[in-house]
Amino acid sequence: MIPVIQGLSDLAADYDVLLSDVWGVIHNGQEHFPEPCAALTRWRAERGPVILISNSPRPAAEVIRQLDGLGVPRAAWTALVTSGDVTRTLLAARAPGPAWAIGPERDAPLYEGLGLAFAGPQDAAFISCTGPVDDEKETPEDYRKAFELAALEGLEMICANPDLVVQRGPRLIYCGGALAALYAELGGKVTMAGKPYALIYDACLAEAERQLGRPVDRRRVLAIGDGVPTDIAGANAQDLDVLFVAGGIHGGELVGADGSLDASATEAMLAAAGARAAYVMPALAW
């Protein structure tokens, strides 16, 4: 059975760096979670760097403004690396495009200063996907017809957010990864920028080295996340120990109304996904 720990204090002697997911671990898109934020604040003060690793399709500066607005204390983290940061590197290499940009208006900062031109699917050189245009209403099926044509044309999709769904308050909404999964199913080529893929981990570990002032010992890096196909799978692929926060995106299946963890269901979910966790908690705490 996966060890169920009471808090980060149980692991304080074993790790030097935390790579922590954001959405689902320290906030839900509408409010921050005080106890997890307090736990990260104490870790940073007493142990070492906390690198936030986010599949947000926006650059770090935009996400920092969001965190501030949600009340996430800056003392809870040392640095932030987003899927948007990695995506900007991929997009800049393909400028001037033109790109067929799919996503809500709020993701526009992703493209600032890259020299990209934009076009519809018939005239684009590639697709840049941050998520549905209207993630409150749309599903991947709304894009099926256009994706069938784009796949036939051989357009590559750059996906800025590999998450399939994300928690917004009590609801789950579709993300870029759900659109990318459909595009790949239709035969389209997809390049992913965020978790569980290597580019974002390379950036995070490089940042950790800058913060430590020395090379990182991967055996002393702990990843924290709530998404099995992204956070857990990504840490597994990088051979990093991972703490699974079961009460996040999968909470409805794994955690009872009283906050108790269903250990058997947790084991079964990870096994079905071919994933492994070093530790599990219902919610992050010290």
Image: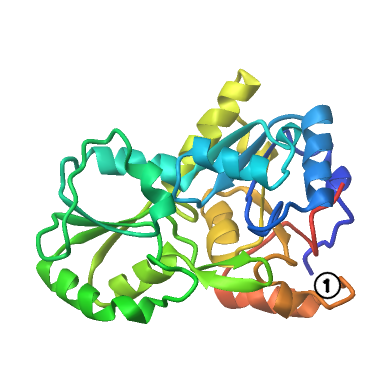
Amino acid at dot 1: Leu
9 left or right of 255 in image: right
Q: Which residue is under mark 1?
A: 261
150 left or right of 209 in image: left
For residue 215, say whether it is visible. no
Question: Where on the picture, by quarter, is residue 129?
Answer: bottom left
Check the image and report above or below for 229 versus 231: below
Image location of residue 158, percent across then percent down: 30, 55
Question: Callout 1: helix, strand or loop?
Answer: loop
Tally of numbered discs = 1
Image location of residue 24, percent across then percent down: 67, 59
Residue at left offset 46%, top offset 76%: 137
Residue farthest to the top, as pictured: 213
Image location of residue 68, percent across then percent down: 66, 40
Q: Quadrant of the N terminus?
A: bottom right
Residue at left offset 79%, top offset 54%: 284
Residue at left offset 60%, top offset 20%: 214
276 left or right of 183 in image: right
For residue 106, say whether it is visible. yes
272 left or right of 120 in image: right
Nearest to the observer: residue 135 or residue 83? 135
Nearest to the observer: residue 145 or residue 188? 145
